[in-house]
Each structure stands twice: as C-alpha cells, then as structure tokens.
Amino acid sequence: MEDRRNKPLRDPDALLEYIDNKMTDNQMYYILLDEIQHVREFEDVLNSYLKIDNADVYVTGSNSKFLSKDVITEFRGRGDEIRIAPLCFREFMSVWPGSREQALEEYLIYGGLPKLASLPSPEKKKEYLQGLFAKTYLTDIKERYKIKNDEELDELIDIVASSVGGLTNPTKLENTFCSVKHSNISHTTIKAYLDMLQDAFLIEKSVRYDIKGKKYIDTPAKYYFSDLGLRNARINFRQYEETHLMENMIYNELRLRGMSVDVGVVVVNTKDENGVSQRKQLEVDFVCNQGSQRFYIQSALRLPTERKREQELGSLKHIGDNFRKFVITEDLISHYQDDSGITFMNIYEFLLNPNRVPFES
C-alpha cells in the first residue's frame, strides 16, 4: 500500500470493492495486504472479512502504526499475531559457505537478518544495519510516541546496548544518567522508553526468579537484543565481548524454541573464614520453562581452569531440585555429564540440534 500506483486503494471502500471483485467463487482466497497502515479505517476493512468463510487475510504494517498491543486490542479474539524473528544460527548456517566456526563469528557480529546473506562486504552489512536501526526502528518509535526530544532515548539505547547481559533497572539507569550524562531524566520516563523498545521488538526483558524461594524478584532485570547485528550496529561495532554476545544468542535461541526464560537466583547461606554467616545470591543465567518442563542453563564461553569451572557450576550445584542442568561452552568437542548430573555441551551442538535441549536424555 506504500506503492504510489496503489494510491486509489488506500480508500477503504475502494479496497473492499477491489477485493470483493476478485472473489468470484467459493474457493479459499488468501488476501495479503502489505503496509496496511496507509489505508484509512483499515480496521473496518479487515473486520469486514471476519465472517467470510473462504477469506483468509494476512496483513503487515509499520511498527509505528501497527505494533503488537494494537493488534491485541483491536482484534482481540478475532485474529492471530505471527511474530517473525531473525534467522537462528541453524538457519543462518544453511546459506553460509564456510565453516561453522567462521559462521558463528559472523553471526555474533552481524546477526541474522536475512538480507545480510546477499550483501557482499562488511562495509555493506554495516551500512545496512545502521540504516535499518536509524531509519526504520527509531523513526517508527519516535513517530508512534511523538517523541520530540529524542537525545535521552538515543543515549538510553546506547547504555542498554553496551550492557547486554547485565542486571539493571530504571532507577539504576536514572542514576547513570545523573552521574555520567548529567541529565535529570526520571526513572518513570526511562521505564516508558524501555517499554517502547520492547514493543518495537528491539529488546526483550528477562526478570529474575528466586529458584529456592519459588518467587519472582521484580528488579533488577536483564535486557537482550532480538538481533545481535542491530545491537552491534547501534554502538558502531565497538564492543565485541564474546561472553555477553553468546549469552544473548543463547537467550534468543531458547525463546525461538518456545521457552519462557528467566534469570535464576539461588540464595546460599555460608560462613566466612571467621565463622560469620553470609548470605550470597548466585546467578543462573537461564531458568527455562515450557509447560511442565523446566531446565537450567549456564552460558560459559570457555572453562580454562578448575576455578572457572567451579565458579560456573556453583549456582547449579546449589539448586537442589531434579530438573536438568546444562553448561553450554565453546571449548568442548562433544557433550558429557559429570558426577553431579550436570551436562556440558558444545555451543554448536546446542545451536544446530534443536531437540537436544532439553528433551533428549
């Protein structure tokens, strides 16, 4: 509908007449309308086909005009929302000409947006991602919410992009703005901006869950980018921390597999060298749930020393239930299970075999 040649069809009555004239019998008709927001009163057009049995309607639209909450509100119970994600690593590998090691490095840098597969050089990929972020995502958000003073929003995105995998909350971010940026932006405004970024499918929020106490901890939380290429483009590809990027990638993969994913907290009571009681909170990277299934994952890029190994295992060993526990790392050839029942798995095995976690014993 953004095509000038179709301008007459932006009139809702003209569009209805055009579609009706195409439906000449009782066979099933599939109606695909792109950039539907260009049509005035498009909701009435779509609702006109709800009770026509041989019409199956699919629409797409700009994020600024047609975000998920709009679909849910306007068409509650009368339609389905289909979310299209960037390519997962397994899909990315299906068009990658080189080794899986090269593919992983490329994927962690440029992400999984399909158009990247046809771009010939790093410069073109960088240009595409930065243009997409600025001209599509940010423009949509600013237009939808009528944001005029966008400097603080831009700075917030930079902060979130720079701290992927780190615990934060609006109050903590407010303090950062005050001390570093010398800005008086409120935590209420920051929360509103974070909600906007989530509704535009740029980031996702993962909240903390007290595993032993069986309760959610409202704050702080972690934010992950839906696509690593967009995240890296936003900060001009300056921060390439494999540990955090791998954690973000694993989170996205789990979400694509239909899991709900939380950040786990295990509270442990210990004593220091003087016998004084201490209360520690150990972190489990991911608490994954799907129906009655639950399992835990620790993301560890490498385990070069026994100390590092014990550091990664500490939280898993203190959980105390019988759900399966995994450590995903890049420096293993094949998976194995240790004496405590924790399964160690190579990152490629996890990414390329979607049924391996958690269902295969």
Image (cartoon, grey):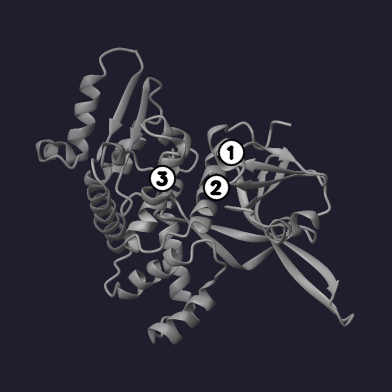
Q: Which residue is mark 3?
A: 107
The kind of residue tagged 1 is: Phe
Indicate which disc, 1 or 3, sits on the residue closer to the N terminus: 3
Judging depth in this view, the residue of 239 and 288 nearest the camera is 239
Extreme residue in the left direction: 5
Q: Do we see residue 40 in this rendering?
A: no
Identify the disc placed on residue 350.
1
Q: Which residue is mark 2?
A: 250
Considering the numbered disc 2 on the image, is that residue within a helix, a strand or a loop?
helix
Q: Residue at x 73, y 68 (%)?
A: 281
Image quarter hosting the C terminus: top right
Image position of 102 with respect to 108: above or below: above
Indicate which disc, 2 or 1, sits on the residue closer to the N terminus: 2
Q: Position of residue 10 (x, y in %)?
A: 18, 41
Does the residue at mark 2 contact the one at mark 1 (Cβ under 8 Å)?
yes
Image position of 105 with respect to 59: above or below: below
Considering the numbered disc 3 on the image, is that residue within a helix, a strand or a loop?
helix
Image position of 49 with respect to 64: above or below: above
Q: Do we see residue 232 in this rendering?
A: yes
Indicate which label's residue lies in the foreground, 3 or 2: 3
Q: Residue at x 43, y 66 (%)?
A: 162
Report how far apart the C-alphas of labels 2 and 1 lie in the structure: 9 Å
Report how far apart the C-alphas of labels 3 and 2 lie in the structure: 12 Å
Q: Position of residue 243 (x, y in %)?
A: 53, 57
Q: Residue at x 27, y 34 (%)?
A: 33
Does the residue at mark 1 contact the one at mark 3 (Cβ under 8 Å)?
no
Q: Residue at x 90, y 80 (%)?
A: 275
The kind of residue tagged 2 is: Ile
Report how far apart the C-alphas of labels 1 and 3 lie in the structure: 15 Å
**Horizontal side, residue 198 vs residue 36: left or right:** right
**Horizontal side, residue 320 vs residue 79: left or right:** right
